[in-house]
Each structure stands twice: as structure tokens, then as C-alpha cells.
Image (cartoon, coloured by chain):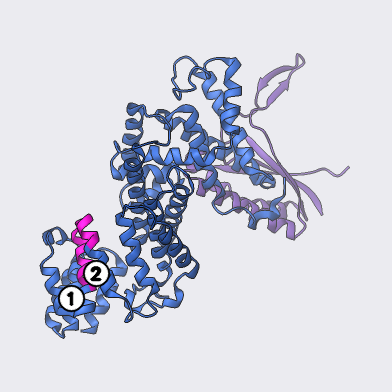
Amino acid sequence: MSGSENINLTIEHLFRRESSKLISTLTKIFGPHNLELAEDVVQDTLLKAMNTWKFNGIPDNPGAWLFKVAKNSALDVIRKSKRQQEYASNISNLLKSEYTLSPTLNEIMGANTIEDDLLRMIFTCCHPALSKDSQVTLILKTLCGFSVNEISRAFITSTDTIEKRLYRARQQLRELKIDFEIPVGPEVSARLESVLTTIYLLFNEGYHSTKHIELVRKDMLQEALRLSSLVCSHPSTALPQSFALHALLHLNGARVGSRLDSKGNILVLKNQDRNLWDREMIRLGLYYLNASAEGEQISRYHLEAAIAAEHVMAPTYEQTNWENIIRFYDLLIEMHPSPVIELNRAIAISELHGAESGIREIENIRDLPLLKNYYLLPATLGELCQRMNDNEQARKYFSQAMHLTNSPSEKKFLDGKLNEL
Amino acid sequence: MEKYMLIFHGGNTQELFSSPELMQAHMAKWFAWIDKLKQKDLYISGEPLVPGGKLIQGTNKSVTDGPYTEGKDVVGGFFLINAKNMEEAVEIAKDCPDYQYEGSVQVRQVMKM
């Protein structure tokens, strides 16, 4: 034992990191249909660690300690239920005999395949049979180690809803009887698409929302980056679209710190202090964007990362290359029609050709009615009217926007706009 | 200075620890507490105990599980600390982070021979 003076050396999120590794390895043994069993063993293992380590410090190799305890727990579980329970199909028979049980567990848990197992777990959580909401929730629970409480805060919903969602997801995994594998061959790109979308949603949930308490938001961004870096570093999934998403997360993540002022007020891009942008994140983002350029295919992440890159490379707001940005938006809309993206494109147009053109573009958005509850639509229109000195119309729009948001910081922002008029 | 033993009961209620972060944060509170005691030279040692001990009693030396098998009574570990007197030892024990997790602390003075 290395004593308690290592309190500050304790790896940040040690329990969370180790928990995702243990869940993944145990799922390899128990099979995805027994996910809850793996979760129980991990919970037990971590509790044991906490109740042991708290008296005189963390052992020199906490990971090995945890794996040993988890392995013994798994042995107990399997021994108790040897005949009634089916575990992972490929090793189920080996787990039924006392002669092969322990050596099999030793081999699986001792093998240096943790990166593979984590990726297998990502693919399991993002199985296309599960709804997107379930996928994100399951990832947060198993791979990011969030509690039901923390997830419900992240989604601004009740713990009951999250419990139900998890219950349903585990049930589906039980019924699906999927193998714990990284997809190969032609299946990879479709399955990977589902994984990337889920990581993207996880990131956006943390990034775009001003409704979260700061800590949860930061954790979600960090976890999305961690998962996407896992995807990028595995040979089967280190593909251009993965790099593009990784680039996008870095380029947007670099700007997180500048989006609120010291009092917690929202700052629009124009008013952000560009010196606060994280240079290292930008460097990595551009590096991955470059790496994503290989290959023939272009994904929505390529385009979104390219737009983000234009923003971070502009020395000032006024020097932003709006022509390029509009061009990327055009391609993006072609590939992925969405009124929200069209709204963003309209904003870019208003910067290049003036507020009037912007408003015209907004009026021409194909599915405009879909945005009727989206507070940024009237907020944008208000901003454009204000620029055209039509204060009366602007006031109308900002008040409309006010009714569409519950976020205190967004309300405060709109209040500020109304006062400017 | 006298020597005191703090005996920690309970504090391992699973339901109260719903996430790995929560457990790690709780452990960090213990480390902070121990560090504070170490800085004042009050902490001598501490050990965790493996759950599930035996109790031997009677002239026939009968062996049973126990004495505590119920979660909140089970002894999880102990500290040896220095304190001026019982009052100070009790004040120290009040800093234990386990009370909100159904933990309790027994304070006993170690007899000087």
C-alpha cells in the first residue's frame, strides 16, 4: 500500500475508467445478454475496493487489484449457477466444468485485449436494434459509469424514465443474443455509423445544451472524446469518418470555455474571446481533419468539422471565410437535409450578404414548421431584424423566443437582447 | 498523548453508491481525513478487515459466523490514533465521512501497561 499521501496522485476518474474496463471484460465472459450480472459484479468490486482502500490508501496497481476481485466474484457467480445459466456462447462449455472454469477466466481476464473489449462494448451498446436514446443511455451507464441519477440530470428527465429505458435496453440485449464482437467485413461501416452517431449525440448533449450543471456537461464532453479516441485507435475502426468525427469534437470542444462569460452569460461566437480557445485541441482537431481526408467517402462529420475548422482558423469574426462555410453547408444539406442546418446556413448567408438575405433564406427553409418550437429560430430572426434597425419586429421575435426556452441562461441572454433595443 | 482505537462499523451500503464517481469521491474524503490527522501527527495506523469472521465461544469452543453479520454492524476496519483524551478522540471520530452512509464509529482507549 502506498499510503494516503497519494491522494493527489490518484488518477482522475480512476473508478469510472476501471469500471468500464471491468464491465467490458465481464461481458465478454457472461455475454451481452447478461449485462446486468456484469454490472452487479462491477458494483460489488468497486464497493469492496472503496471499503478496503479508504483505511490506508490505494494499492500500487489498483487495476490489477480490481481485476482479481472481479474475477473471483465472477467465479463465484458462475459456480453458483453453473447449470441454469448460459454465458457467452463461445466459452459457455468451458465455464461448465470446474477443470476449465478458472483457467478460462484467467486467460480471458489476463489477456491484454482491453482496448478490443471496450470497443466490443461500444458496438454492443450501439446495436442498431436499440433506439438512439437507449444507445446513449446505455453507453453513459456502462462505459462512462454515470449513475441513473446523473443520466437523468443530463437528459433533464426523471430517474424513472432512465430506469425504464435501461431496463428495456437490457431486455433487448437478452432477447437479441448478439455475440460480443467487433463487426468485420461489409458490416463494419453500417455498424460504425451507429457508433459515431451515438458518440456525436453524447457530445452534443454536453456541448449545445446550456441547461446542464457545469460538471455533468464537462464529463459528457470528456467521455465523448474518450470513446471517439478509442474508435480512432483501433485498426478495424480507424477510418476516415471516425477521424472526421474526432476532428469535429476537438474543434468544437476547443471553444467550450469561451461560450459563457465570467457571470455565466451566453456569448455568441462574434463576442467570444478567441484567446480563450484551446490551442492544443485546435491543433489536434486540424490534425485529425487532415487524417480524415484519405479515402473517397465524405461524411457529415467531414463537413461539420470543415465548418468548425473555418471558425477556429479565422483570426477575427470579421475575417471568417463565409463563402467556404456556405459551400460546406450546401453539401451538408444535400447529404443530410435538416431545417436546423438550413438555419445555420442562413446565418452564414446573412454574414456574407446582409441581414435581409438571411431573412429571405430563413423564409425559404424547406421544413420551416418543424422549427416552430426551436428558440433559436425567433432568436435569429430577432437578431437579423435588429441589424436592420427594425426594433419593433425584433422585439416581437425575442419575446417569442423567450417563450420557447426554459433555460435560465438563454432567458437571460434574450433579456439582454430586449434591453438593447 | 493517549492511544485510541477507532472501530468503524457499517458504511458499506451498496444502494447509496450508485456510481463509480460517487465511490471515488467518498474514498477521497477518507484520504483527506487521514491526511489531516497525519499532518497533526495523530494517525498511527489503519487497516481494513476482510468481511465475514468467526466467533468462538463457550467451553466447547463452538465456532459460529459473527459476531455481526448484519450490514450496518459489521466492522470494516480500524484506526489507531493519538489523542489527548477521550473528548479529543471523539471529536476526531466525528470527522469520519461514513455517517451519511449508515456508518458508526466506536472509540476505545488503548490501555497503557
**Residue tagged by mark 1?**
A382
Looking at the image, residue A38 sits to the left or right of residue A380; the answer is right
What SS does tag 1 mark? helix
Taking the magenta stretch, the answer to whether it contains residue A343 is yes
Chain B is shown in which shade? Answer: purple
Give the answer, above or below, for where A359 lies relative to B24. below
Residue A208 visible in the displayed image: no
Q: Is residue A236 above or below residue A240?
A: above
- Give how far across and how far down residue A367 sits, in percent: 12, 59
Label 2 resides on the chain identified as A
**A187, A202: nearer the viewer:** A187
Q: Which residue type carries mark 2?
A: Ile
Residue B46 horizontal side relative to residue A230, left or right: right
Mark earlier in primary sequence (2, 1): 2
Bin the neighbour count of mark 2 within 10 Å (Cα to Cα): few under 14, some 14-19, many 20 and up: some
Question: Label 2, on which residue?
Answer: A326
Q: CA distance from mark 2 to mark 1?
A: 21 Å
- Residue A306 % position (x, y): 34, 64
Q: Which residue: 69% across, 56% down?
A: B35
Give the overall secondary structure of the magenta segment.
Answer: helix
